[in-house]
């Protein structure tokens, strides 16, 4: 298996018109979750990915498992819970460049994941384990499960990739979130923070100083996301380098861009690209996703990705 990722995905309801959620009368249902977004992004690029999670024994769970399986992702370690529901969340497009997200995930099936529930062979065959800072915030049992996954990965030579993906609403307080995000970062081989997450962890610094602070935690490779400006990359074998981003004329939906970035970087590494070229692929993936409504809907296949990197897609293909 190329990449294994563990975490919660929820049913996503998006209003069919822009404006405040209170005025919405009709919605489209999609699915969204950082870890499954990464798994789908990798699968569309031809890689083998596995998503591990727990879903409610409900219609949302049925539809979600079918959708993700249909994207070519291995869902053989996804289990169902008869006593807890599949989580849901809503997006609100208030106006241009003002998107808000509301979660309804407390006591969801995914929050019941535990160390006892996680099977060793679900992780042990992976080249990379992708984790985020969302999963440990769901519950104490999820933190224990993630610790087990990390232990299995380290015992089998699996590289650990950590995206902080800060979601303050799911943590008891900022101090708890800060402690655990630093802890999981320090246990990982590659970390993919954004500027706002780095500021939360370390206070006000320059992007270059943030990179050094992450290295000081013992992290081999740091890839600092700079939004439309691109990314900074630094590792033991690559000096600090800025990789340019790709311009986007109009951002339709920014949610999921970081997950697409992670999928692009992992894809490049799996293909044996130099680190800077892998990050360039990540930048392209992140840009492409922002131009489509939905968490996973804008994730490209290889031909679309290559066209975009090489100069953009035509307005009309005939």
Image (cartoon, rainbow, N blue to C red):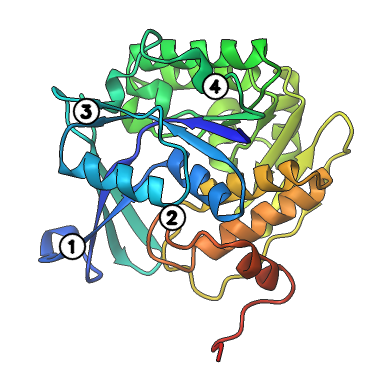
- In the picture provided, is 294 more to the left or to the right than 166? left
Q: Quadrant of the C terminus?
A: bottom right
Decide which of tag 2 and tag 3 comes sooner along the chain: 3
Choose top left, top right, bottom left or bottom right for residue 169: top left
Q: Are marks 3 and 4 in contact (CB under 8 Å)?
A: no
Residue annotated with mark 4 = 123
Decide which of tag 2 and tag 4 comes sooner along the chain: 4
Q: Which mark is residue 106?
A: 3
Which percent across, then down, holds residue 45? 61, 54
Decide which of tag 3 and tag 4 comes sooner along the chain: 3
Decide which of tag 1 and tag 3 comes sooner along the chain: 1
Decide which of tag 4 and tag 1 comes sooner along the chain: 1
Real-space CA distance between mark 4 and mark 1, rounded to the nearest whole angstrom: 36 Å
Residue annotated with mark 1 = 27
Residue annotated with mark 2 = 296
Which percent across, then down, holds residue 107? 20, 24
Real-space CA distance between mark 2 and mark 3, rounded to the nearest whole angstrom: 23 Å
Above or below, comparing residue 22 to residue 54 in the picture: below
- Give SS at disc 3: loop
């Amino acid at each position: 298996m190329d990449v294994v990722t563990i975490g919660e995905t929820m049913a996503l309801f998006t209003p069919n018109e822009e404006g405040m959620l209170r005025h919405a009368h009709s919605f489209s249902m999609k699915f969204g979750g950082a870890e499954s977004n990464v798994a789908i992004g990798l699968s569309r690029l031809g890689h083998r990915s596995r998503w591990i999670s727990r879903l409610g024994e409900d219609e949302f769970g049925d539809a979600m498992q079918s959708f993700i399986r249909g994207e070519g992702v291995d869902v053989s370690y996804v289990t169902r819970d008869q006593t807890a529901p599949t989580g849901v969340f809503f997006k609100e497009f208030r106006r241009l460049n003002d998107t808000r997200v509301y979660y309804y995930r407390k006591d969801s099936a995914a929050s019941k994941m535990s160390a006892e529930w996680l099977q060793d062979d679900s992780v042990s065959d992976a080249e990379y384990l992708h984790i985020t800072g969302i999963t440990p915030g769901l519950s104490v049992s999820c933190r224990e499960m993630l610790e087990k996954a990390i232990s299995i990965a380290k015992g089998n030579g699996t590289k650990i990739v950590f995206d902080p993906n800060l979601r303050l609403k799911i943590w008891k307080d900022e101090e708890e979130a800060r402690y655990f995000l630093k802890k999981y970062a320090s246990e990982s081989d590659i970390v993919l923070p954004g500027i706002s997450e780095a500021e939360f962890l370390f206070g006000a610094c320059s992007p270059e100083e943030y990179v050094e602070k992450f290295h000081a935690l013992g992290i081999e490779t740091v890839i600092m996301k700079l939004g439309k400006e691109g990314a900074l990359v630094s590792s033991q074998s690559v000096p600090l380098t800025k990789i340019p981003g790709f311009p986007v004329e109009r951002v339709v939906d920014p949610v999921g861009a970081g997950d697409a970035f992670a999928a692009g970087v992992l894809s490049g590494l799996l293909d044996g690209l130099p680190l800077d070229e892998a990050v360039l692929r990540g930048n392209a993936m992140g840009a492409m996703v922002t131009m489509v409504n939905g968490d996973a809907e804008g994730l490209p296949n290889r031909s679309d990705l290559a066209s975009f990197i090489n100069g953009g897609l035509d307005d009309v293909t005939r």
